[in-house]
Image (cartoon, rainbow, N blue to C red):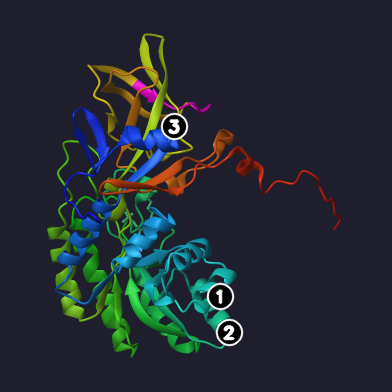
Amino acid sequence: MPSTTSEPAFVRRAGVLHAEHVPLPAIVAAVGTPAYVYCAGTIRDRLARLEAAFASVPHRIHFAMKANSNLAILRLLQELGAGVDIVSGGELFRAREAGFAGRDVVFSGVGKTVREIEQALDAQVLLINVESEAELVTIDAVAGRLGTVAPIAIRVNPEVTVDTPHAYIKTGEKGQKFGIPRDDVARLVSLVRELPHVELRGLGMHLGSQIGNADPMRDALPRLLAAIAAARAEGHAIAYMDVGGGLAVPYHAEEPEADIADYAGVVLAAARETGLTLLLEPGRFLVAEAGALVTEVLYRKHAAGKDFIVTDAGMNDLVRPALYQAYHRIEAVESAAGTIVADLVGPICESGDFFAKDRELPDVGAGALLAVQTAGAYGYTMSSNYNSRPRPAEVLVDGDRFAVITERERLEDLVRLERAHLQWRTA
Ligand code: LLP
């Protein structure tokens, strides 16, 4: 039975951490560690919550697949009726493989190549979100060459203050590379009228990621609405208003569940005022809490008065702590007797390779399994082969069943694209 559950994805039964109804040690016995484990029921639940929150207006939820672009996860969301927000030709390819049609796709991103624009037009995507004048002109030229008209949206940078846990995940503030500065929008809207191969169908914005309250949205929406009104006044047939993604999820145990009612209230009021179809681009909200990175403890180490727990997962598998000083909850898969203040570190030759610093952790030794929680978003998609480490396996759990959705990379995969015999050429 497919599960939809508002229960936490990972629950402890008889001392053992389960993903839905599957004990994590059983998954590890089948696929080894490190492994990403995702719970389908939680993904279904989060999508259902968003659908319910926005049910009163015409809307479409476009999953920002940069958060988790595994084909099985995409298929799950596709079957539930979601669309996708993509940022590259590679994501478009994955989306198509997963069964999304062009009309299910909005194409964001600040640096689309001519090839990517061609691919998007070929696929007949719903909207290409324009992020600069130069890009607008390029899209017009490419569409002209292909004998078509590109449906576009202008991404407005509303230039509001955004409070995110790390500067690298802000986007809607002044001076960011993203979007068209709000003072420039009117000029671009007028320019569209002079370009025969683009049609302005929407206006949008994306304020940042892991935004914990509706204040930035409250500040930004009037600016988006003003841009929409101006575009309509110029005769553009605007059909869509895109408010981007950014909904926060709790990473700390004591944090409450994300409350989307406030956010939805603010957005719904604006959507009603315009009468437009509302587009949302949540990434993290749909998948973060559904996933954990399961790792095995390799060693305990005591050095310079400190305790270290060394795991077989590293920053190449989950880079968020190293890159954003991000906090991820750590749980012992089999209940530990006590706790110890220690650093939880990976095997990689970098000081930044840690999952927790000076934190109270389960007092576990070699061979124990740990779950790094809330790793379903921006985990595997940001992983790398650094230190020539094959990427981990990914597993999807649904009720009492589990399936491998990505095989663990093999050593041969590491060198598959490298040439043993070089074919030297001269210019
Ligand atoms: N739409 C656009 C145009 C975006 O750039 C993003 C995220 C989203 C939607 C989805 O945002 P979300 O709902 O997931 O917050 N790697 C970082 C997050 C980077 C987000 C980039 N853009 C992290 O691990 O926290």
Q: Residue 237: x percent and y percent?
A: 33, 88
Which residue does the numbered mark 1 point to in the structure image? 118
Q: Which residue, as the protein is rendered here, is positioned at the far right?
A: 426
The picture quadrant where one finds residue 203 is bottom left
What residue is disc 3 on? 313
Distance in Å between CA atoms under marks 1 and 2: 8 Å
Asked whether the viewer can see residue 327, the reply is no
- What's under tag 3, amino acid-wise? Ala
Q: Position of residue 83 (x, y in %)?
A: 34, 68
Quarter of the picture containing the C terminus is: bottom right
Q: Secondary structure at mark 2?
A: loop
Mark 3 residue crowding within 10 angstroms, few (<14) / some (14–19) / many (20+):
many
* Label located before the other in sequence (2 or 3): 2
Depicted 89 relative to depicted 350: above or below: below
Specify which label sits upstream in the sequence, 1 or 2.
Answer: 1
Instruction: Give the residue pinned by disc 2.
Output: 146
Contact? badges 1 and 2 (CB < 8 Å): yes
Amino acid, disc 1: Glu
For mark 1, give the secondary structure: helix
